[in-house]
Amino acid sequence: MKKRISVIGAGTCGPETEALAERLGFLIAENGFDLVCGGRMGVQRAACRGAKTAGGRTVGILPGLDFAQANEFVDVPVITGLGHMRNFLVVKNGDAAVAVEGGAGTLSEIGLALKSGIPVVALGHWSGIEGVRPAKGADEAMDILKTLVNG
Amino acid sequence: MKKRISVIGAGTCGPETEALAERLGFLIAENGFDLVCGGRMGVQRAACRGAKTAGGRTVGILPGLDFAQANEFVDVPVITGLGHMRNFLVVKNGDAAVAVEGGAGTLSEIGLALKSGIPVVALGHWSGIEGVRPAKGADEAMDILKTLVNG
Amino acid sequence: MKKRISVIGAGTCGPETEALAERLGFLIAENGFDLVCGGRMGVQRAACRGAKTAGGRTVGILPGLDFAQANEFVDVPVITGLGHMRNFLVVKNGDAAVAVEGGAGTLSEIGLALKSGIPVVALGHWSGIEGVRPAKGADEAMDILKTLVNG
Amino acid sequence: MKKRISVIGAGTCGPETEALAERLGFLIAENGFDLVCGGRMGVQRAACRGAKTAGGRTVGILPGLDFAQANEFVDVPVITGLGHMRNFLVVKNGDAAVAVEGGAGTLSEIGLALKSGIPVVALGHWSGIEGVRPAKGADEAMDILKTLVNG
């Protein structure tokens, strides 16, 4: 199977963060990875849109039990009913994770990823957390992700 | 999104049950549905193989955290680490479920499906359970499933 | 730690089933077991009330995230947010399970218990399911449970 | 029901951190709260021991399906089979959480707590995280927790 990158981050965001997430999603697909995310809005939606522009495949692991929670760029929605516990599945279903800004939910995903051996790259807010690899932009993040996943 | 049928049933089975599950998987894909299953062996693998022969798409919701648990006909494996609790996600990610033989695990999936409003068709072992719609073969099961899902 | 018996069954029930569940809860506590259940109404509440009358301890594993879901006879409520998936935790946190009537939710618990090696005694509705030990009343159920748990 | 404080933190720790956690557990029980934790070793075990010394009650929400994972000071072990996802249940079953040192697992618990509205006090390692209330010792932490929980 194709390697996968999980994109995590702010559920609502401004145009700058959105553009960053979209570029990241584009690069993920262009580099031959499937994109995994929480399937919803903000960074998740922007990253999915970018991945679809590059012809990629997107998996959205949703917190609730309603497929309508998924944004329109998710190819394979998976409902879980796990609420915040689904955050673990978002990061664990990838070979690496990349955080774009985000709040406490993103912080929990970073913790769960690091705890279970998934490497994390971060742009913005949480890039100073111990164990996380900081990146300055989408292209640098992609370079680090490729090294992490392909060895 | 495409409607989905969940296939549940025996994790190990003889050639007759396998042929039945494969035919069912083929019909599910041929009729334009995505196939959801537990992603593993026996009925799950045979149904996925049938769906792939008909050019369909297969989602496998795995009990553990290892993608290698998935059979080779799963297009989109999803690891969960939920063990037997993932049975709920297998049935709930479909618009209807169909059981092909099976033991206590399949029984739990039937109960979870009925409890959460997912209609169930059964071939063989559990077809006498209250609330389940019995079918005599793959083609009859498919006819009932189409009526259930498309209304 | 004390051995535990899980009581599963109808979420709403008439006075006869309620009396049966209450007697069963009483016997469980009187025989020195902790009682585990889903923490809510019907058979669960009646069994908890019986256990408290006998001075026992009751654990309620709730489907949602609101402690107010627990009935007033639950000593230790545990919120899960797992919805129907919490059914697995109800049976798996006991050394044996006993079903008193019930519908599809109880059926899922019976399947999950049997699948994961928890023996099941049933009164009423589901007592004919393969693998389940049928009982005629609370006292007979208790006798079987003691043999199952204490060997 | 009694209010509850969740104690999270390092799974293995030196004597100084252990003494801190034990003092905290003692104070939690002495102030009339039940103690919730992950049920295992290090900070969890030390806090449980402290709570038992003060005559309190301890609930341990375990990651696996084996009661033997619980430390000897857990009164009510709950097995979950959820692995790292159980971290959410540890914090969500309390009215407030307090972190004593800890690594990525503790970080995930802090994120999950903050995301779901559970206030967090931290001693040591993660006390600088945005949204967390830092404390200098067990007694100060207890004072903050009382204010948070009792209003």
Image: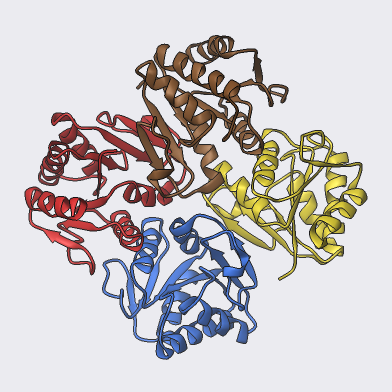
Chain colours: A red, B brown, C yellow, D blue
In the rendered view of the protein, which quadrant contains the C terminus of chain A? bottom left
Q: Nearer the viewer, residue C48 or C2?
A: C2
The image shows residue C25 at horizontal and vertical percentages of 82, 55
Q: Is residue D91 visible?
A: yes
Q: Residue furthest front?
A: B15
Residue B107 figure quarter: top right
Res D151 visible: no
In the image, is A131 to the left or to the right of C130?
left
Query: Relative to D69, does residue C7 appear above or below in the rendering?
Result: above
**Residue C44 place in picture, x, y as percent:** 74, 48
Can you tell which quarter of the image residue C50 is in? bottom right
- Report which quarter residue D130 is drawn in: bottom left
Q: What residue is drawn where x is 49% and y is 35%?
A: B38
Please tell me which residue is depicted at 41% across the width and 82% down the height of the picture.
D13
Closest to the observer, C139 or D147: C139
Against C69, is A75 above or below? above
Instruction: Pinpoint residue D19: horizontal percent, then vertical percent.
Output: 46, 89
Query: In the shown orientation, is residue A149 left or right of residue D124?
Result: left
Q: Position of residue A59 (x, y in %)?
A: 31, 36
The N terminus of chain A - image quarter: top left
Picture layout, residue B114 above or below residue C110:
above
- Residue at 15% x, 50% y: name it: A146
Above or below, B42 relative to A113: above
